[in-house]
Amino acid sequence: MPLHIKRLVFTFVGLLVFFIILQQILKPHSFGVQGHFREDAIKENTQRALQYAGKANCTKCHDSIHAEKKEGYHSTLNCEVCHGPGLKHAQYAQMFEGKELPDSLTLIKPNERKDCAICHQRNAARIKILFDTIDNTMIHQIDAMEHNLISKKTKKERRCIDCHNPHQP
Amino acid sequence: MKKEKKQFSRRDFFKTGAILVGGVAASAFLSSVNGVLIAGEPSKKRGKWYGIGIDINKCIGCGKCAAACKNENNIIKEPFYFRSWVEQYTIKNDGTVKVESPNGGIDGFTQSIPDEEIFKSFFVPKMCNHCSKSPCTQVCPVGATFETSEGVVLIDPNYCIGCGYCIQACPYGCRYKNPETGTADKCTLCFHRLDKGLQPACFEICPTQARIYGDLNDPQSNINYFLKNHNCMVIKPNLNTGSKLFYNALTPEVR
């Protein structure tokens, strides 16, 4: 074999070995087990913190409100739709039963007009049939600027919950 | 030396021509049979393979799903980072379409067009389609985004180099660059909740049950029930992304 070919072969073999060693060092653990990605990443993705507790959780302690809500038009609404994420609240209340909840863990109580209007404000896009809700009605809409103000002239507002029970509207 | 010249008669020309055209037509026909539902094939036939269904007819546009998504996943509360958001489509009498999504719908919607001018209006909740042939995972240069065997497209934030190719590649605009970490970010179908047997946050919160998800491999699952009973469609089927987000009552204006 001519000398220059030999040199070329040596260089290539050397580079190949170097590349393989480098790849072994740099390749992260569990890469390529299931495909072109780190398998560990799947597990890491499951380890994030939860915020929402889920339907069943609230009913354990607030069963009277659940029973009340079950009968009314808001039966399809989850507690956390209005009250916000409540897993920390539920966990704390369970761990320290009978203790006062710290302010950071009491949930929001959406009792302003705009909180109800987010779903009930009149909007052409909202007129549709909800087959699964009570007696096949659409979402009932009101004009939050008009519906039952204290005085139409001064536009003085009244809270929706003065007349409607949010858990059983 | 005499070179033998192969004779290519007119007859041969028509013959090969017919075969070619017929073949192309047949393959086109075969792939067109491959409809929306079987656009993607599960990587394994056993086990879970998640699909999502959204009923546009039921959505009342409260935007609680977008808010829940931000709460659950600690997304920055600025108005351009969304994993899940709602768009309000309004088709006017003159045929023009107006799409609005103020802050992803979190603060609720108002109709900016007077009722007399509206032909039709509806809300479209959007999120990652969890495509089975997703363009976003294919372009990743380092293998930091992938599809799990459950059919959920995930990101490996520790391995992402933040090049932004996947953000460009997603035809549905479902990815964004997380300004805190500098890596790409997207809906994970709340993989951490699924793992613990809970529903993803946006499904949990929907007041009208407009969203459902389930196992496409299980013939009894609610997603298959939904697909059987509604005329479902995916967004941009022409791109052949193998999208697994099926919309009931999707109209061609939505893109």
Image: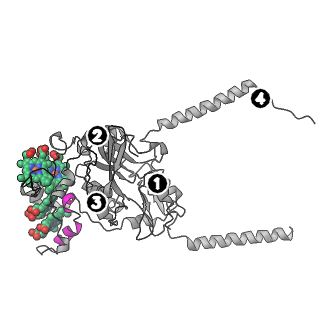
Specify which label sits upstream in the sequence, 3 or 1. 3
Q: Image point 23% across, 59% down: which residue?
A: A54
Asked if marks 4 and 3 touch (Cβ < 8 Å), the reply is no
| Left or right of B96 in this view: A76 | left
Mark 4 vs mark 2: same chain?
Answer: yes
Residue that mark 1 sits on = B170
The residue under label 3 is: B67
- Spot occupied by residue B240 in the image (x, y as percentages of width and height): 48, 45
Evaluate whether residue B245 shows in this view: yes
Looking at this view, name the residue that lies furthest to the right.
B1
Q: Chain of mark 1?
A: B
Disc marking residue B8: 4
x and y percentages locating residue B117 in the rendered image: 28, 40
Residue bounds of the magenta highlight: A72-93
Crowd band around label 1 with a 10 angstrom C-alpha radius: few (<14), some (14–19), many (20+): some
Question: Residue B32, percent across and down?
Answer: 49, 36
